[in-house]
Image (cartoon, coloured by chain):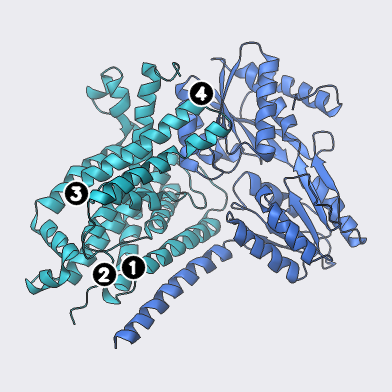
Amino acid sequence: MSEFFTVASLVFVVGSGIRLATPFLLAGLGETIGQRSGVLNLGVDGVMLLGAFGAYWTILETRSPVAGILVGIAVGLVMGLVYGVITVSLRAEQGISGIGIFLFGLGISDLLFQKKVGTPIPIRGFGDLHVPLLADIPKVGEMFFQHSVLVYIAFLLVPVVAFLLNHTTFGLNVRAVGENPAAADSLGVSVVRVRYTTILLANGLAGLAGAVLAAELGIFQQNLTNGQGFIAIALVYFGAWRPIGVMGGALLFGVVSATVLQWKTLGLVSGAASSLTAMAPAVLTILALVVISRTVGQPAALTRPFDRG
Amino acid sequence: MQGKKNWKSLGLVALLAALGLLAGACGSDGEVASGGDDGFRIAIVAPSASNDLAFSQSIVDGVGALTGVSAVDVTDGTFIVDDAAAAIRAYAGEGYDLVIAHGSQYGGSLQEIAADFPDVAFAWGTSADTFGLPNVSAYTAASDQGGYVMGAMAASMTNTGIIGVIGPIAVGDAKLYVDGFVTGATQSVIGITVNVNYIESFSDVALAAEAAQGHVANGADILTGTAQMVVGATGVAAEHGAKWFGTQSNQTALGADIVVASQVYKWEVVLQGLVDGIKQGDLGGESHTITLENGGLAIEFNDGVDAGHARKIGEKAIKEISAGLLGTGT
């Protein structure tokens, strides 16, 4: 175990954990916004897949990572509109609707990939951006300031989303709609407009999460996200519907995953122990969820459609 | 009125889900193989995409190379065993001449289904177990052989003396390949370090990429890996200028500047015999292995990467393994 506790090893684990956390964080922030307004979207993974393919194909055709990211966001917005129609206008049950979106995204992204691309072809993303001066700090620079610009954007969104939800009129309306939509409606807040807005924001971020994944990996493949969207939903509960909490959960998941990877690379775990340690990130997340669920309540109107009557 | 809206919304959701499933199914086109039009139909059920440049692609390419086959249908992406079992049963019920269950995780289901359809020929890989059933053939790859060759080559090419391996789960041909690779590297050059990381997933591309990052951070300048998630690792190799050795399919397309060689599975070497036997009334009952000797395993070099004397080492190892003069230690 002493091989793990070296500066180089720990620096790698932190940097790797930050990279692994980024897609979870983006999708989790979006889902937080949605859930605070009372809308649960179990289709996050499907939207991420569509955003990932949209970004991948765009970068492949245009060689522009920026265009790819924008297309990923746009795809997310379109799916958000679809989800808004289903759950807000038609008032369909949110859980089932979300699963439908997930299956749709899983199938369509694979179909489009098979028809438009075929065999996986590598693409070039943004590359690492070394933050001037900060990147040169020994060890600290390597851990925090030598990542892709998309990683920085993801973490900078945390205070932005927190400010949006907690210090703006829009955020107040979102929270009011998520707790008691009838009361919010009686005070003149358009529940429909607020929910549509939050759903668009949520799915736009999910599309961005998928786009970031494809751009950073430099490839697309069937089921590229491998269920990351569902982990992001769990992280919203873990974070008690607060952006800073979601960031903490994403980092915990990412760093634990990176730690397990490093243990295996160094040969510190093998055989059955390897399989057991692979479960560690998920097990820790579940344990944290159990603890948090005892102390923090979800938005009171979560999953409840609003009918003005 | 509320009831009507609920039915409408439920219908919309059902339609979306159905569209998604249909899209997924449409992603797996039926393909018509070359060869004669004698009505011999083959169905393949595979766990990942048929163009994954790895496990599933190898069987699709192999079947595509067969002669005397009039139609091939593929159901890919069936990583859920129950879905695969349903597809296998459906193909058997539709009268396909040969149903290939390409995934060791399908064994339990196949044993049950094959017994229900004694007049249909089944093939299961990668495995050596036919369950004692006369209509089940098993096929596997001696992937340790190619692994040994690549390991020997990698050991002669590394400048840092450290090589990284990204594996899925330590089972089947994946484990064989990795074990052969490690043996080949460590027996060829004294003092070589081969770090192996099984990420416990066949499909987690992001985790495979991070595993590759870990190897590079720990000093590896040569990487290899097996299963469909390696597309994440090859990107990392390309980013850091590390060389890559591939397996299952030719992976040069993933990095023309970094892929040195690939061990390619030529399943047609054993499948053609199955097809010919089935036409004669022999539905199977035996297990088959592709090897360097029988041509089922081929090491395809990428001429775009100068392997130097490592290529000669590789070619020598191929000859010796094929002749039975060199063992892989597995």
Q: Return the residue at label 3.
A: A161
Q: Mark 4 sits on what residue?
A: A268
Between the C-alphas of marks 4 and 3, the distance is 40 Å
Q: Nearer the viewer, mark 3 or mark 1?
A: 1
**Mark nearer the N terminus (4 vs 1):** 1
Type of amino acid under label 3: Val
Mark nearer the N terminus (2 vs 1): 1
Give how far apart the Cα atoms at labels 4 and 1 are. Answer: 44 Å
Instruction: Confirm or deny contact between disc 4 and disc 1 (CB under 8 A).
Output: no
- Residue corresponding to mark 1: A94
Disc 1 residue type (three-letter): Gln
Q: Are marks 2 and 4 on the same chain?
A: yes
From what the image shows, is residue B250 above or below residue A129? Answer: below
SS state under label 3? helix
Mark 1 nearby-residue class (10 Å; few <14, some 14–19, many ≥20): many
Residue displayed at 52% across by 21% down: B220
